[in-house]
Amino acid sequence: RRLEEMRRDFVANVSHELKTPLTAIKGFVETLQQGVDSPAQAERFVGIILKHVNRLQAIIEDLLMLSRIEYEAKNGGIQSVTSRMADIFRDAVQICRPLADENRIAIEISDEEEIVAAVDPVLLTQATVNLLENAVKYSEPGRKVQLSAHRTASEIQIVVQDQGIGIEPKHLPRLFERFYRIDKSRSRAIGGTGLGLSIVKHIAQAHGGYVTVESSPGAGSHFTIHLPTADRDQPKRPVM
């Protein structure tokens, strides 16, 4: 019953996510066909159309990424490369820097152990980017986001901690479902496809790990990617 409920929700959500921009595009195209009062108005309408086209493209790209991750995980697994967490963090922060600067959010990095592990660096960078972007988007200006890596006896932990608005406990069990949104209007206003956390979950699973979250309203959120160290410490290719 739980799986059937999730399936119904997914179909309803993906239909809504695709229908909303398509309806807007259709409406503005029809308006342009009928004629507008000025070139400035036409330019504004074209800009709105482009915005919704970009949103559709982002949704499709994220869906394709999820499909690719699932396929690779089922057919021989991901391509692991011995990589430095510091390099992955540097690339992820570089991607997120413009958004962080725009929102006046400081990103602090900590990798005191200089951790090296056999991972897919492209996928792990994407997972880190997704968590960082969420942390930035849901934080008030002037706050900070902390990105850190830790090694235990059995796993490597990648932690993204923010000082944002936090999440109510009732939402936590479904947070990593595709297209699940806590606040639909706010989520769309700040951007995103509704697939970011689902991608993080599948990337962690493709590495044999998982992702967890600790959060409460007003106290920020603490996301952790858990990657097992067993059989992953021996390099398969040279360090990047």
Image (spheres, helix red, strand yellow):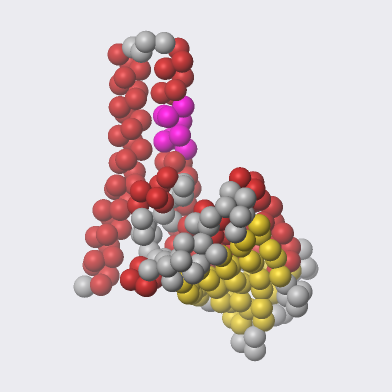
Residue 214 or 51: which is nearer the viewer? Answer: 214
Q: Main secondary structure of the magenta part?
A: helix
Q: Is residue 53 visible to the viewer in this orientation of the structure?
A: yes
Residue 186 or 165: which is nearer the viewer? Answer: 165
Residue 112 x %, y %? 76, 75
Q: Quadrant of the C terminus?
A: bottom right
Q: Is residue 83 visible to the viewer in this orientation of the structure?
A: no
Q: Quadrant of residue 156?
A: bottom right
Give me the residue at 56% from left, 65% from top: 162
Left or right of 56? Residue 8 is left
Residue 114 x %, y %? 76, 74
Give me the residue at 40% from left, 47% from top: 188
Residue 62 or 27: which is nearer the viewer? Answer: 27
Residue 81 x %, y %? 69, 68
Q: Quadrant of the N terminus?
A: bottom left
Q: Quadrant of residue 53?
A: top left
Q: Quadrant of residue 239?
A: bottom right
The total number of labels drawn is: 0
Left or right of 212? Residue 28 is left
Give me the residue at 33% from left, 36% from top: 22
Q: Is residue 12 magenta?
A: no
Vertical position of residue 103 compared to residue 20: above or below: below
Residue 146 or 132: which is nearer the viewer? Answer: 146
Q: Is residue 53 magenta?
A: yes
User: In the orientation shown, which residue stands out farthest toward the left?
Assistant: 1
Give me the residue at 46% from left, 47% from top: 190
Residue 24 x %, y %? 33, 32
Residue range (magenta): 47-54
